Amino acid sequence: MRFENDNGALVFYRQGEMVRIEAWGTDSLRVRAAMRTHFTQNNQALTEAIETCSTQVAIEQTDHWVGDGTIDKREIASITNGRIKAVVNFAGVITFYKDETQILREYFRSYDGTLSKESRCLKVINREWKGIIGGSEHSLNLKFESNRDEKIFGMGQYQQDCMDLKGCVLELAQRNSQISVPFALSSLGYGFLWNNPAVGRVTFGKNYYEWIARATNEMDYWITVADTPKQILENYTSVTGRADMFPEDLMGLWQCKLRYRTQEEVLSVARQYQKEGIKIDQIVIDFFHWTLQGDWKFDPQYWPDPKAMVDELHAMGIKVIVSVWPSVDRKSENFYEMAERGLLMRTERGAAQTYDYQGDCVEIDPFNPETRKYVWEVCRKNYYDYGIDAFWLDNSEPDLGVYDYEHYRYCSGPALAVSNLYPQMYSRIFFDEMNKAGKGSVVNLLRCAWAGSQKYGNVIWSGDVPSTFEAFSDQLQCGLNMGLAGIPWWTTDIGGFMTDDVNDPDFRQLLIRWYQFAVYSPVLRMHGDRGPYNIPPLDNRDWGGGYLHTGQPNELWSYGEDNYAIMKKYYDIRISMHGYIKSLFEEAHLNGSPLLRAMFYEFPQDSLCWEIQDQYMFGSKYLVAPILSLNQFRREVYLPEGQWKLTSTGETYTGGCMVTVDAPLDYMPVFELL
């Protein structure tokens, strides 16, 4: 074991492993390790410039009892940056302290030559590297001690009913509706970023925590301490980046459905909204408006004059967003050039196919800068130059025919080692160039993200989720944990994505409850695949914009007069909150705070707020209690300390208690903090 002070960083070497611990932002440390003599110098999510920190590194000799009862001298070392300190013992085990209180310690259960607690014969070590046969990467297993009283939040979006992730096993991989953003926020007052895009797994077990990367060249994590979740998130976003200021003209209603099939259909919907006196900020043109996947252009048979369409929508004050997929059909006009130039994903064996929905497709390789340049140029010519304002970057995980990550490879390495970064690199095809154009804040819509994606103009939505109250309930904890992972621009498909029958009264009740929730969320967006599928195709071709099915109408007036009246009422509420919503987006830009906030984010001293996951704060002013069950017309709400006004009646309540309030179909309980 050998320690070094490398210009204020603590470096040590043991059994072929090199470990570096250094200050990285306020009260924060970055820890890297590799089974070789150098690091990759890839900062991954840690993209932001950091101020020089004043650190203290100490290397000293200490007494240790050894097996024969005698005293031996061993070196230990520590590094301190503000309120955080890491101590490394002679076995290479790292322990972290916040103001001298232990918060996290690596798990070690192997004989180390002493009679200490960790001296056991299990041969379980804290950092386990295993070389991958036939490759240069290693698999990595990092373990930490578990704290029984700790609660853990963040980590992105997982379709489950657990908001507190203690006891959960989470796949570190991207799937449709699953988003791995590996930042964990602890109730013990620290935040932990697994700064590694490798596919793997994390287990927040009762006995120990375990982070696994299936293929990597180095370990890289970052840890910060602070007194409140808000301060932790501020520290985190200061090193990974913050969202730009969200445009004011996108804070209202976005209109979408699966799918508007023609230029005239889009215009007729926009004209009807104008006639109804309802301003929509953006209309979304969904998939298969194109000729083939990978052509990235309108089918001229159904979209004869995109420029005229965009001009008319702009004249109504409506922006236009168009769907782009990363899949390229073999029949696409771009396929063979992209394949020849190495701009597509590669398979390790067998057929060169990665996606099989409505075609024989291979996804693009956005890790390759030439790919990014190629795709942008096609989309610029066929969309952006017509005045299209934004891009819906769907399937951005990417969606794969089979999620067999060891089967795929990118120009930067095997998918096992890098693929969690795919959605971020995909988004940068558009963000980087649109940002250069200087037309204001870039806002694109994506189905996936990774740590730091908030700085690349990404509105993330929760994916193709079922139209059920159970799924609706899951989306609430998904949104709260996404915010705690640093992603403030988040939304859902109102009513869920997959609906069998829009005429089912149970679905219509779900739609209203979901819509009420969406009004008090960052982005209000109508979307869904609405059955029954009894609308005939536009033509008999097996390609182009006419053959694929479309869902039932999904505009506010599509669900009967009674429901329309409720949605108009809540639309007006959304518009009335414009100034307040603007202030929340400003706060997200300035300090990383989410708009959708867990109760403990605003009330960290209230222990009950750390237990609640069925209500939330919309900013600091409104406590929102969504209705998450069918035929529920009353519910209990916990009010923290303070004076609260129920928005339906104006009645005031003194907090620190549970209250029961009415929730008729036309009202979702909301309390204003006075």
Image (tube, grey):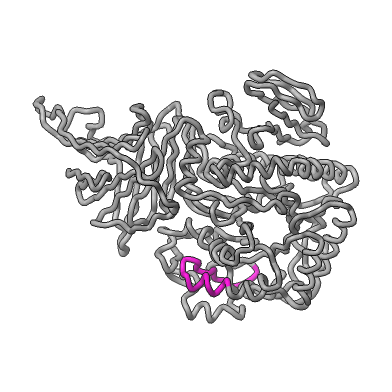
Residue 135 falls left or right of residue 584: left
Name the quadrant containing residue 263: bottom right
Q: Could you tell me which residue is drawn at 86 percent across and 61 percent down?
A: 271
Residue 613 falls left or right of residue 654: left
Q: Could you tell me which residue is drawn at 53 percent across and 59 percent down?
A: 423
x and y percentages locating residue 374 in the rendered image: 54, 75
**Is 363 part of what is drawn in magenta?**
yes
Residue 119 falls left or right of residue 84: left
Q: Is residue 495 above or below residue 650?
A: below
Please identify the quadrant where the N terminus is shown.
Answer: top left
x and y percentages locating residue 188 in the rendered image: 44, 30
Q: Could you tell me which residue is drawn at 32 percent across and 35 percent down?
A: 85
Is residue 266 visible from the viewing direction of this image? no
Is residue 267 visible from the viewing direction of this image? yes
Which one is in front, 494 or 75? 75
**Is 463 part of what is drawn in magenta?**
no
Name the quadrant containing residue 224: top left
x and y percentages locating residue 365 in the rendered image: 49, 68
Q: Is residue 137 above or below residue 662?
A: below
Which one is in front, 176 or 197? 197
Q: Could you tell me which residue is drawn at 58 percent across and 75 percent down?
A: 377
For the record, the magenta segment spans 358-376
Counting labels gives 0
x and y percentages locating residue 397 in the rendered image: 55, 58
Please identify the quadrant where the C terminus is shown.
Answer: top right
Which one is in front, 593 or 449? 593
